Image (cartoon, rainbow, N blue to C red):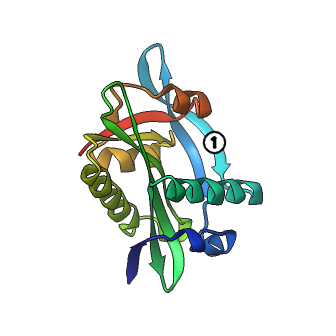
Amino acid sequence: MVQYRTLRPDELCRELFRGFIRRQVVTKCWRREDGKWVIRDDPFIDDWSEADYRTLVSCLQNTLATGGVVYGAFVDGTLKGFASVEPDFLGSGGQYLDLSSIHVSEDARGSGIGKALFFMAKEWAREKGAKKLYISAHSAVESQAFYQRMGCVEALEYNQRHVDAEPFDCQLECVL
């Protein structure tokens, strides 16, 4: 049985992620070419190094310290999924809150954890007064299929900071 809860600052450390498997084998990705979205072969394995985990922990700690939220999904006491929403509004009308991360461990994908975490993030953002979630999302076809199932569409307004940080990401929004 999966247990979901809000994470506390004191538990955000590298050890929390010991049973988490980021690995994602990617073969095809969405790319924007000549103003159109196309699927292209772009095989690679996406995984996190120890340095990536240190950065992740620091970013999630900052999310909590600045008033955002981090949710965790646990199976037998081991973290198998997490999602974070930043507290600062984005967009020309302040309509967005940023879903800064949502990840499910490789061994737990397809179990509904991502969907549950996504709905928790949506509810938190709605309660804070956002109209939409903003997502700078991995372009892998499997990742994009998940976001499409969650009701996400291409963002009407791109956040340039996200575009600059991850130029191959798909910039999405989800109405709350």
Compared to residue 66, the image places residue 109 above or below, namely below
Circle 1 residues within 10 Å: few <14, some 14–19, many ≥20: few
Q: Position of residue 142 (x, y in %)?
A: 45, 49
User: Which residue corresponds to the image point at 29% horizontal and 40% vertical from the top-left?
Assistant: 132
User: Which residue corresponds to the image point at 52% horizontal and 37% vertical from the top-left?
Assistant: 29
Q: Considering depth in this image, is 138 or 136 the residue closer to the camera?
A: 136
User: Which residue corresponds to the image point at 57% horizontal and 54% vertical from the top-left?
Assistant: 62
Q: Position of residue 129 (x, y in %)?
A: 26, 46
Q: Quadrant of residue 89?
A: top left
Q: Considering depth in this image, is 106 or 59 the residue closer to the camera?
A: 59
Q: Quadrant of residue 105?
A: bottom right
Q: Considering depth in this image, is 88 or 31 the residue closer to the camera?
A: 88
The residue carrying mark 1 is 43
Compared to residue 35, the image places residue 57 above or below, namely below
Q: How many marks?
A: 1
Left or right: residue 34 compared with residue 52:
left
Return the residue found at the far top: 34
Compared to residue 60, the image places residue 172 above or below, namely above
User: Which residue corresponds to the image point at 31% horizontal and 50% vertical from the top-left?
Assistant: 125
Left or right: residue 51 compared with residue 69:
right
Left or right: residue 146 compared with residue 54:
left
Q: Position of residue 119 (x, y in %)?
A: 30, 58
The amino acid type found where label 1 is placed reads: Pro
Q: Quadrant of residue 148?
A: top left
Q: Secondary structure at mark 1?
A: strand
Q: Position of residue 1 (x, y in %)?
A: 38, 84
